[in-house]
Amino acid sequence: MSRIDERFEVLREKGEKALVGFVTAGDPSLSDSLQIITAMCEAGVDILELGVPFSDPTADGPVIQRSSARALANGVSLRKVLDMTRDVREKTEVPIILFSYYNPIHAYGNEAFHQDAEAAGVDGLLVVDIPPEESDEMTDCWTENGLALIRLVAPTTPVERMRWIASSGSGFLYLVSKTGVTGSDGLDTTEIRGHAESLRAVTQLPICVGFGISTPEDVAAVAAVADGVVIGSAFERLIEDNVGNADLLSILAEKVRACKEATKKRN
């Protein structure tokens, strides 16, 4: 059983939902980033989503775009992200998902990336800009029990396409809460519930919802209808607002603990 599967099984037994925490690798610096990731995992992140910085992050809002630009300015590459993953894996057994655009992986080499990612302790991969119809180019070299391929499902996706996307995914499915980019405001939990129910009818994979979730109240509302909640821009905004602040790690840990608490079932 993979680390991802084990984590969801443990959470189900505890009556909790997964807190998936996104940060951009190498922001605001490589050394600070490793400390940030470690602190967040210790504070309660169930799954770490580690962003590979990219020069044209079209699915991301301005907060994550700026974090990616800072990391690139620090010389962070996919190879350095894998090195960081190896360092993180020495400190924690929290499942690690790499969030990337396809260009860095293609430039690295699909087979070499797969081998190096597995060796570094990566558990899964989410590639935001490669449609399922085209992903065989990337995954043909993958081993059967290798990386989980996290599929994205949009709120506009018809049910039959949901079924087809889900059939080729593993680990969990990432249900986008709304149209737009990461970090945009406004959550309609009634719509999210409807999309989650439609998706749950065609898959047994856990469903994690992301985009626009920033507060413990948001987390509690979404956790009521999903198996996990993804937070990214809210964490990156705290990092951006507190660069150079000696209390950054404790500020982030407090945010993680509050959001994790909101994933727990209330009797």
Image: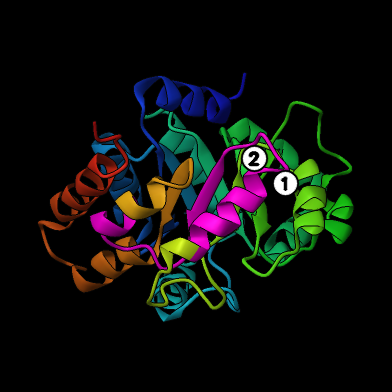
Q: Is residue 104 above or below residue 69?
A: above
Please tell me which residue is depicted at 40% across the width and 69% down the height of the picture.
187
Quadrant for the N terminus, please: top right
Q: What's the magenta region?
A: 191-219
Compute the Cα span from label 1 to label 2: 6 Å
The kind of secondary structure element at disc 2 is helix
Q: Is residue 31 visible?
A: no
Q: Amino acid at mark 2?
A: Ala
- Estimate the x, y position of residue 125 in percent, counting from the top left: 64, 47
**Where is residue 46 drawn, in percent x and y?**
39, 36
69 to 225, vertically: above or below? below
What's the mark number on residue 113? 1
In the foreground, 125 or 230: 230
- Looking at the picture, which amino acid does disc 1 mark? Phe
Q: Residues within 10 Å of mark 2 (few under 14, many from 20)?
A: many
Q: Quadrant of residue 267?
A: top left
| CB within 8 Å, label 1 to label 2 | yes
Could you tell me which secondary element the residue under label 1 belongs to? Answer: helix
Q: Is residue 233 visible?
A: yes
Q: How many marks?
A: 2
Q: Answer whether residue 70 is magenta in the image.
A: no
Q: Is 198 drawn above or below residue 170 in the view shown?
A: below
Determine which residue is flagged by label 2. Answer: 117
Query: In the displayed structure, does residue 221 sit left or right of residue 207?
Result: left
Position in image of residue 75 (x %, y %): 49, 67
Q: Residue at x 59, y 49 (%)?
A: 197
Q: Which percent across, then down, holds residue 185? A: 37, 77
In this rendering, the answer to whether 233 lies above or below 11 is below
Q: Going 57% across and 49% down the picture, which residue do you hit?
A: 98
Task: Report whether 206 appears left or right of 95.
Answer: right
**Dot 1 alpha-carbon crowd within 10 angstroms: few under 14, some 14 to 19, many 20 or more:** many
At x 23%, y 40%, the residue is 261
